[in-house]
């Protein structure tokens, strides 16, 4: 194991970015009970690091430290706080190659995508450094002649975050940055599959001069214990979670006891609709980008591709050809476009969905089986003849499978697209301005991509409706979740 750690360190320009201890109350620590856990490279199956496995005790210390440090932090000028966030952005960009290497080693996505994720994660620090200076209150005309009414925006307190493995840098970055910009303390627990990228942000924060104790990064395999500490500790006033709807529901129930403010970025089941009047080549390119980004492992990847009757066959043929050409391999090798899935359970889920389609009359246009690269690899797949009765229509596959559904009318497409408990991302391709307007209004989703398969940016509000979540991340609205309004009524 230690050889693998040395191996990963040896390919970094700055090996100190590979931190395996917890970052608690401003110190780098091992677990109190000495426990640790292995982090594995999903492409190769080898252990790349042994990381401190923290328990509730260390987490409670981190929360205490964040509560103590946050008052002085909030009292600093916004420009001053912004300066620290800006330095975090600059340092992340300066170390982008190393951070991308760590990310690919623990998560598997190709290096080019990992570099993109580091820039994406860093952009939240840049954006919220700027927004920190624009936390404006309000004055309201008084309701009586002697009354002067104002609204103050104040930091909510200590914010806790739980993040998934699919974006080990960007998902925690877009929670840390608005929390710190707002003047909050922060405690975050990254997924146990991918703690190293989050710990590297701790190293960056230290170097950028973030006050000790204000932010802690808490690696642990004891997910449910840590979730309970976050929800039951009265010093925590806000919980931000990205992950499955199932775990989101558990956390919301737990957070109810303290009436804690929650942001939930949960599962999706994104429809991708291609109308007869679409630019066919653009729609194929958009579908590949959208479906196969991160090997299908994002909550905004197309999960159901609805194609209108008139262009179904042409679209299916072109898509299958493009997908068959995707290069699959170890993400650390330059030029690879699709890496492994995160673990064997993820591959099994993909297999189950494909088998279900095939058993109910669907067909394989390309792929359709495990890949000979290794146990975590699955072939890039396109399936035809998929219908609403199949599992893939109802559940998020989170893998490299593009299922094609056929439809006849606009109404039918909208109805099938909205027939889900989820409401995060949706997409459609059309060149008819009337249809573009009607469909974007009719889709019950938090985000709609029109004639594009990629929309993520720090400047726009990201989040879902229905059981895909609550709250928005990024944009000027992304600060609201970390602020409280205080109404002041002054009698003069
Ligand atoms: N919205 C999104 O971006 C994501 C959606 N998903 C969806 O969820 C499915 C399952 O993925 P999975 O990774 O298992 O997602 P989970 O929701 O199980 O995990 C997300 C995070 O929550 C943690 N967690 C799990 N259980 C608890 C708990 N009881 N209390 C507190 N924290 C908890 C996990 O820790 P640990 O790592 O230790 O399990 C991880 O950090 C995917 O196939 C996909 O459909 C998954 C990831 C991201
Ligand atoms: O999968 C997610 O949870 C987020 C997708 C990344 C993004 O587009 O912001």
Image (cartoon, grey):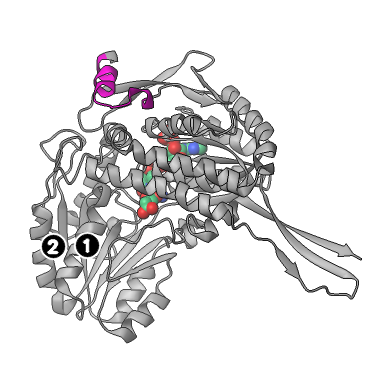
Of the pair 72 and 224, the residue shown nearer to us: 72
> What secondary structure is marked by label 1?
helix
Q: Residue 319 — which label?
A: 2
The C terminus, quarter of image: bottom right
x, y percentage for residue 419? 38, 68
Give neighbour class at mark 2: few <14, some 14-19, many 20+ (Cα, 10 Å): many
Mark 2 and 1 residues: CB-CB less than 8 Å, in contact? yes
Query: x, y (%) of residue 446?
Result: 44, 64
Is 395 in front, or is 173?
Answer: 173
Ligand 2 contact, mark 2 (Cβ < 8 Å):
no
Rendered position, 143 above or below 113: below
Write the residue at 34% across / 75% down.
414
Count of numbered labels shown in the rendering: 2
State whether residue 177 is above or below residue 55.
Answer: below
Choose top left, top right, bottom left or bottom right for residue 468.
Answer: bottom left
Indicate left or right for 295 with 465 as reference: left
Horizontally, is 416 left or right of 229 in the view?
left
Q: In percent of the image, x 32 and y 38: which residue is there? A: 96
Residue at far bottom of view: 434
Question: What percent of the width, then of the height, locates residue 136?
Answer: 65, 60
Using residue 269 as the reference point, say whether residue 212 is left or right of it: right
Q: Position of residue 26 (x, y in %)?
A: 56, 25
Element assignment for label 2: helix
Which residue is tagged 1? 287
- Seen from the viewer's position, the closer of residues 433 and 96 is 96
Evaluate whether residue 387 shows in this view: yes
Q: Residue at x 63, y 33 (%)?
A: 66
Q: CA distance from mark 2 to mark 1?
A: 8 Å
Q: Quadrant of the N terminus?
A: top left
Q: Is residue 252 left or right of residue 157?
A: left
Residues in magenta, as a range: 3-18
> What is the crowding at mark 1: few (fewer than 14 residues within 10 Å), some, or many (at least 20)?
many
């Amino acid at each position: 194991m230690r050889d693998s750690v040395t191996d990963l360190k040896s390919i970094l320009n700055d090996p100190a970015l590979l931190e395996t201890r917890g970052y608690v109350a401003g110190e780098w620590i091992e677990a109190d009970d000495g426990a640790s856990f292995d982090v594995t490279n999903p492409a190769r199956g080898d252990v790349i690091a042994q990381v401190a496995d923290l328990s509730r005790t260390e987490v409670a210390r981190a929360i205490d430290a964040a509560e103590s440090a946050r008052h002085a932090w909030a009292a600093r000028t916004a420009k001053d706080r912004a300066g620290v966030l800006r330095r975090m952005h600059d340092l992340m960009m300066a170390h982008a190659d190393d951070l991308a290497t760590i990310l690919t080693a623990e998560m598997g996505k190709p290096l080019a995508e990992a570099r993109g994720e580091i820039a994406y994660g860093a952009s939240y620090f840049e954006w919220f450094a700027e927004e920190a200076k624009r936390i404006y209150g309000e004055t309201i005309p008084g309701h009586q002649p002697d009354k002067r009414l104002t609204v103050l925006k104040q930091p909510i307190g200590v914010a806790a975050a739980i993040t998934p493995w699919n974006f080990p840098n960007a998902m925690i970055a877009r929670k840390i940055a608005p929390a710190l910009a707002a003047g909050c303390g922060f405690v975050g627990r990254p997924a146990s599959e991918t703690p190293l990228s989050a710990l590297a942000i701790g190293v960056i924060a230290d170097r950028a001069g973030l006050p000790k104790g204000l932010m802690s990064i808490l690696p642990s395999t004891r997910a449910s214990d840590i979730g309970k500490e976050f929800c039951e500790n009265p010093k925590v006033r806000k919980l931000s979670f990205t992950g499955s709807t199932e775990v989101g529901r558990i956390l919301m129930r737990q957070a109810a006891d303290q009436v804690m403010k929650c942001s939930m970025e949960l599962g999706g089941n994104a429809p991708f609709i291609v109308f007869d009047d679409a630019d066919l080549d653009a729609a194929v390119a958009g579908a590949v980008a959208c479906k196969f980004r991160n090997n299908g492992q994002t909550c905004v990847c197309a999960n159901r591709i609805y194609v209108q009757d008139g262009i179904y066959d042409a679209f299916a043929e072109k898509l299958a050809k493009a997908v068959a050409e995707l290069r699959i391999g170890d993400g650390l090798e330059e030029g690879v476009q699709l890496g492994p899935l995160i673990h064997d359970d993820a591959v099994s889920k993909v297999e189950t969905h494909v088998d279900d389609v095939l058993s109910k009359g669907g067909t394989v246009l390309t792929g359709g089986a495990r890949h000979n690269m290794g146990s975590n690899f699955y072939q890039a797949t396109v399936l035809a003849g998929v219908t609403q009765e199949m599992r893939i229509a109802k559940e998020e596959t989170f893998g490299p499978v593009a299922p094609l559904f056929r439809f006849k009318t606009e109404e039918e497409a909208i109805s099938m697209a909205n027939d889900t408990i989820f409401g995060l991302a949706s997409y459609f391709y059309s060149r008819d301005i009337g249809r573009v307007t009607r469909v974007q209004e009719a889709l019950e989703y938090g985000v709609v991509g029109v004639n594009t398969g990629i929309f993520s940016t720090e400047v726009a509000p990201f989040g879902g409706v229905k059981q895909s979540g609550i709250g928005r991340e990024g944009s000027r609205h992304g600060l609201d979740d970390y602020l409280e309004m205080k109404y002041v009524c002054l009698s003069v």
